[in-house]
Image (tube, grey):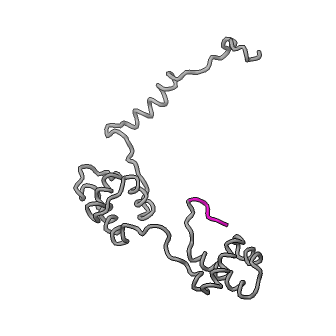
C-alpha cells in the first residue's frame, strides 16, 4: 500500500494487480473485498472501478514511464562506457584518474549533454553500474619491513600505558 522512498515501482506488476482487480470487480465482488485480495487501498479500487466503468480495461493499462525521459540513450551510455574503459589518458586527460568533472566533460564532448558532477555519479552508478574507486594513497618509497619493525618494537615503547597502582582519583563523583 504505497511505495517506500527510493524503491523503484514495477509498472508491469501494478498493471497486473489492476487487471486482477478488474476481473474481480466484473465478477461482482465488493470493492472492499477486491482491495483485500489484491493488496491495495479501498480508495484505489474505487478509482479503478470508476475507470473500468468509464473506459473499460483500456483505462487500467499502464501509462508508460514515469518522470522525464532520459537525456542519454543506451547507445550514448555504451559509447561513454567504452571511453571510460579506455582510460582518462586516451580521452586526453593528464592523469589516470576519472573524476566526476572529467566524466561530465566527456559526456558533454561526446553527447552534447551537460550534467553536474553530482548527477554524473548517478549516471555512473545507476546507468552503468560503476562504483567510485579511490586509489590507495601510499608512497612509492614505502618500506613495509621497516613499518612492521617500527610497529612491533618502537611503538610499544612510545605508547602510553596506565600506571599499575597509581594514585587515587581526585574526582568528587568517584566512590573509593
Residue 55 higher or lower than 151, as above or below: below
Q: Position of residue 118 (x, y in %)?
A: 40, 52
Residue 37 higher or lower than 142, as above or below: below
Residue 2 higher or lower than 134, as above or below: below
The residue at 58%/82% (across/down) is: 59
Along the viewing direction, whichever of 2 and 137 lies nearer the viewer: 2
Q: Is residue 85 left or right of residue 63?
A: left
The magenta segment is 1-5
As for residue 105 lying within the magenta part, the answer is no
Say which quarter of the image contains residue 30: bottom right
Q: Is residue 164 left or right of residue 79?
A: right
Instruction: Count all numbered tags in the image, as a single digit.
Output: 0
The residue at 55%/21% (across/down) is: 160
Q: Main secondary structure of the magenta part?
A: loop
Q: Quadrant of the N terminus?
A: bottom right
Q: Quadrant of the C terminus?
A: top right
The residue at 43%/56% (across/down) is: 131
The residue at 36%/54% (across/down) is: 116
Along the viewing direction, whichever of 76 and 144 lies nearer the viewer: 76
Q: Is residue 151 left or right of residue 115?
A: right
Along the viewing direction, whichever of 165 and 112 lies nearer the viewer: 112
Q: Position of residue 21 (x, y in %)?
A: 68, 80
Residue 150 higher or lower than 96, as above or below: above
Say which quarter of the image contains residue 146: top left
Amino acid at each position: 500500500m504505497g511505495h517506500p522512498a527510493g524503491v523503484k515501482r514495477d509498472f508491469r506488476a501494478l498493471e497486473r494487480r489492476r487487471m486482477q482487480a478488474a476481473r474481480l470487480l466484473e465478477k461482482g465482488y465488493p470493492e472492499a473485498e477486491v482491495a483485500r485480495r489484491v493488496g491495495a487501498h479501498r480508495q484505489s479500487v474505487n478509482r479503478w472501478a470508476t475507470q473500468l466503468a468509464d473506459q473499460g480495461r483500456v483505462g487500467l493499462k499502464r501509462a508508460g514511464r514515469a518522470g522525464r525521459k532520459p537525456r542519454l540513450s543506451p547507445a550514448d551510455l555504451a559509447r561513454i562506457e567504452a571511453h571510460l574503459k579506455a582510460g582518462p589518458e586516451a580521452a586526453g586527460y593528464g592523469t589516470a584518474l576519472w573524476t566526476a568533472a572529467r566524466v561530465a566533460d566527456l559526456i558533454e564532448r561526446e553527447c552534447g549533454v551537460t550534467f553536474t558532477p553530482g548527477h554524473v555519479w548517478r549516471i555512473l552508478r545507476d546507468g552503468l553500474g560503476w562504483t567510485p574507486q579511490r586509489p590507495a594513497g601510499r608512497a612509492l618509497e614505502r618500506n613495509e619491513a621497516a613499518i612492521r619493525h617500527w610497529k612491533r618494537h618502537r611503538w610499544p615503547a612510545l605508547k602510553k600505558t596506565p600506571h599499575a597502582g597509581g594514585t587515587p582519583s581526585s574526582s568528587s563523583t568517584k566512590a573509593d
